[in-house]
Image: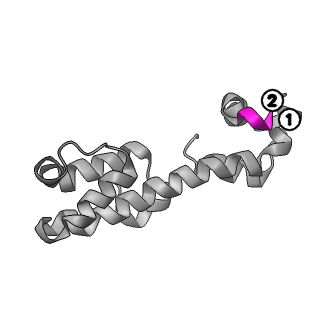
Amino acid sequence: MPSLAAAETMSFGDSIGLLAKSCGAEIVANCRGVNPDSTRLKECLSRNRDVLSQQCQSDYLGAFDAIQKRVAARVTVANACQREIVKVCGGSTKETSKSIPCLVSTPKGIGNNCLKAVDDAGYR
């Protein structure tokens, strides 16, 4: 499991894995029935902070922060890769997700800012 120091590059799966490992019992005991989207689950854990284990308390904010960073990084791809999406991949900036396979597999013509955004978003 990656450390929270690597939160900027922690995958969605690793973030959820960290939450399950550190906070699984607390989620079952205190957040049963809560919609499992990250915002509601984070709010539930925050409301119940006084009954969370020390491990859960130290990990859950970092895990949710990593999820938010990953979501923001994926939004950044559309902005950082506009030229590449249109010119290299023949796609539309309105449908960025359809151009991801091209951005990942076509290193020629892809600028450094776009490559970094693709990497930060976890696509490569």
Q: Which quadrant of the figure has residue 23?
A: bottom left
- Would you say the residues marked 2 and 1 are in contact, meaning their CB atoms lie under 8 Å apart? yes
Q: Residues within 10 Å of mark 1 (few under 14, many from 20)?
A: some
Q: Name the residue nearer the viewer: 41 or 64.
A: 41
Residue 79: percent from left, percent from top: 75, 50
Residue at image location 11% in from the left, 66% down from the top: 51
Going 12% across and 51% down the picture, which residue do you hit?
25
> Magenta stretch?
91-95
Amino acid on which the number 1 mark rests in the picture: Val
Q: Hey, what amino acid is under mark 2?
A: Gly
Q: Could you tell me residue 32's position as x and y percent?
A: 17, 45
> Counting residues from the N terminus, which is met first, the one under dot 2 or under dot 1?
1
Q: Is residue 60 above or below residue 15?
A: below
Mark 2 and mark 1: span between their CA atoms?
Answer: 5 Å
Judge whether 8 appears above or below 14 on screen.
below
* Residue 91's disc number: 2
Instruction: Confirm whether the magenta stretch covers residue 70.
Output: no
Above or below for 63 versus 105: below
Residue drawn at x 44%, y 47% is: 11
- For residue 84, side relative to residue 34 (left or right): right
Q: Which residue is mark 1?
A: 86
Depth check: 69 or 7 in front?
69
- Viewer-closest of 91 and 47: 47
